[in-house]
Image (tube, grey):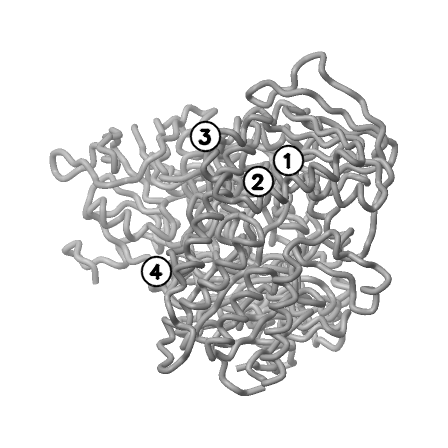
Amino acid sequence: MKVVVVGAGIVGAACAFHAAAAGLDVTVLDRGPVGAGTTSRGEGNILLSDKEPGPELELARLSRDLWDEVGEELGPETVELEAKGGLVVASTPEALGALHAFAARQAGAGVRTQAVERVGELEPHIAPGLPGGVHYPQDAQVQPVLAAAALLRAAVRHGARTHTGEAAAAVTGAGGRITGVRTADGTVLPAEAVVNAAGTWGGEVGRRLGAPVEILPRRGFVLVTEPLPPMIRHKVYSADYVANVASSDEGLETSCVVEGTRAGTILIGASRERVGFDTAMNPAVVATLAAQACRLFPFLRGVHLIRAYRGFRPYCPDHLPVIGPDPRVPGVVHACGHEGAGIGLAPGTGALVTAQLLGRPWRGADPVAHTGLLPDRFLTTGGVPK
Amino acid sequence: MSESRDLVVVGAGPAGMAAAATALDGGLRVVLVDSGAAPGGQFWRHPALFARETLPTADLHHGLSTYRALCSTLSAHERTGRLTLLLNHHVWTTARDEDGFAVHAMDRGRAPEEEAVVLRAPALLVATGAYDRQLPFPGWDLPGVLTAGGLQSLLKGGGVVPGRRVVLGGTGPFLLPVAAALAARGAKVVAVCEAAAPSAWLRHPAALLRNPAKWAEGARYAGTLARHRVPVRTRTAIVGAEGEGRVAVVRTAALDTDGRPLPGTERRIEADTVGVGWGFVPQLDLLLPLGCGLGDAGDGTMAAAVDDGQRTTVPGLYAAGETCGVGGAALAVSEGRVAAVSVLTDLCAPGRPGTRRPAAERRAVARHRAFARAMAQAHPLPPAWPAWLTDDTPVCRCEEVTAGAVRSARADHSAADHRQVKQLTRAGMGWCQGRMCGPAVHCLVARGEPYAPAERLIATPVTLGALADSGESTSDHT
């Protein structure tokens, strides 16, 4: 089966990696270099801690196991995979109660959680006086661009090809079935299936393929400090983060996520703003993130911020990724809308898309176990968007 | 401070001083902000006030009469309260505001404390200058290897001669005043290695003939260098530095027409200090996040694209001096004046004087630009300079990324620009954020294209504590 994967970000690279490993004939199409979009704009989160029980957590659990497989196959150093664990801390006794209740539901869905009474024992430099938190030992970190590049290179070793260009339209045959993808320069790449892994541009690519899905941008800033000796061991979040990820409120939300990196820098994320694709600097957001980080780790007050970057998370209206065949155009398979979780969910998405293409389970991904992510949820029975 | 301001000028070098003076003379209220302790920028850098008498630097400067006239104009306007001069203020970012621009600075007048300050105005002029362009070579990370601009700053700003035996290398007319200044202060300048051919200037006779002042300046340096017996070797480059813990020996070589070292021409020269400069890179950090369009400056760099009134592609945003392409202080002064007249015109202040079309200044800008372009063409980066690098030569010193790693990012991952190389290798992710290695990394992966720096939303490091406090109580100079 000939498959064109549109998008060489982390999700497209993971789709290409699994599909090529399964023996499919894969071509990856992107207008730019590997991982140049949202992949390069995040922190490299592989998280279970921020997900409530449901279809996304099921995919995240599968994906977490598959990240370990990626690490074994490609070398954990190659992708800087680090199982550092997450620590979610509450700032008030009420917030701690809510966090414990949330963690109990997650534990019921198979997530490993450990209540922590004295967070200072896990994080010696954290602010004193915090009432407690929850430790999530499965949370991990990866360097996303290195990971996307390594997955793509492994896909090429399995026979995949890369093609620089922009998807312009679907070429269809009998019954409206996909027979290829036309690129902006007129080249036609033959394909029996096209995977829409275009991230933030997934809505536009879906439209060009005749299978529109609603993918919206949500802007985020990440701050990077000067390099320091190791000061922060885990991914440390305030419990507010859990509320914000699932929020549909307009406007700005910030709740701090602080972590050290191997290079010595400390990353501080993650604001969430619905401002379209506006790239403007927002100094107020930077100041708010800095204030929240300093409240969690007071030593940060004297530490220099040397860089800030921003990106656009691709999200669907219901904040779940859309993964699976589009019934309106046979052959189109969506794999986008992962919002801020695309790095963590990438290998699971790649395996699930491959299973859907093969029509049978692949590497632990069983299509019947992930029906909650199918595009059908946005469509009425006539195939028209709701 | 709560009075309204018409214009914020960032950078009090030749361009910013001239722009502020002209805008003030035209009746505008101006904030002039600079990170230094005194106006003047890099070109008119002076020792601290208390040391000026003991450290005379007048002989190291050019155009001091212009500098003094601008200083006295600015002082007069400061006394009337229409100029707010903010020194020791480091601008860390700029953003669009409802009615113009918000310039975010840190007041470091009481270092190590810093306090956030926001400056707001309908018009913003960015005159942040340029910084040395560096090309790596084996040993360039040894102590004792400096930039040519750094040597000049030490001399002008503190009377410091950092070594006894100095070798200078690179390309461009700037090497000559640095050599002359070092010699005048007692350093033995063992060699000046100029990569360009001596005949290169002759290819652009018209631009040279229209700028007789430049000839006179060049002749003066030549006289100083001859008097101190400083050898200037053309078609020659520094290809290596060696030493235990500090530079002790410099390796130079003659270059072929592509800039490749000619076999058998290598010389070893004993020296304790090396100064290297391959021209300059415009400092665009405050302009890029505002969406300012760029243009090819003709010297291998991109610079702010401006119209003949120094207007950038963003309404209300102006640029003057080296941010529009490197061309020297005289050009910067003219551009600053032209920019200020545009601000006066665009703000449509009725009855304000000084809004006449500055035809003479525009002609001066055109003449100096033509000269700068001729200089740039006479002093290109030698295309084959990467031939000096060994695979283990560090290219990014902050993150210790080697030339071999950059080359393999290009070969194995088809990295086609410095941003992609950074993501794959960390080159440019450290303290200097690619200011030192960016042009070199760019040349290694994207030859032929002019260098556009990475967008830096944080233009200078700031403490998280000061930022955190700024959210609650930013002193607002509106």
> For residue A239, which numbered disc appears in the image?
none
Residue occupying the point 22% across, 57% down: A379
Name the side, left or right, on which B69 lies relative to A62. right
Q: Which residue is mark 2?
A: B439
Residue A167 % position (x, y)? 28, 40
Q: Which residue is mark 3?
A: A155
Residue B136 % position (x, y)? 67, 34
How far is disc 3 from disc 2 in space, using C-alphas?
33 Å
- Residue A243 appears in the rendering: no
Up the image or down, A76 lies above or below A290; here it is: above
Element under disc 2: helix
Q: What amino acid is labelled 2 in the image? A: Pro
Determine which quarter of the picture holds residue B315.
Answer: bottom left
Element under disc 1: loop
Q: What amino acid is labelled 1 in the image? A: Leu
Up the image or down, B73 lies above or below A236; here it is: below
Q: Quadrant of the N terminus of chain A?
A: top left
Q: What amino acid is labelled 4 in the image? A: Leu
Q: Which residue is mark 4?
A: A216
Closer to the eye: label 3 or 1: 1
In terms of depth relative to the viewer, which is nearer, A136 or B299? Answer: B299
Closer to the eye: label 3 or 4: 4
Q: Which residue is mark 1?
A: B135
The answer to whether marks 2 and 1 mark residues whose Cβ atoms lie closer than 8 Å is: yes
Q: How many marks?
A: 4
How far is disc 3 from disc 4 in space, using C-alphas?
29 Å
The crowd level at tag 3 (other Cα within 10 Å; few <14, some 14-19, many 20+) is many
Closer to the eye: label 4 or 2: 2
Determine which quarter of the picture holds residue A55.
Answer: bottom left
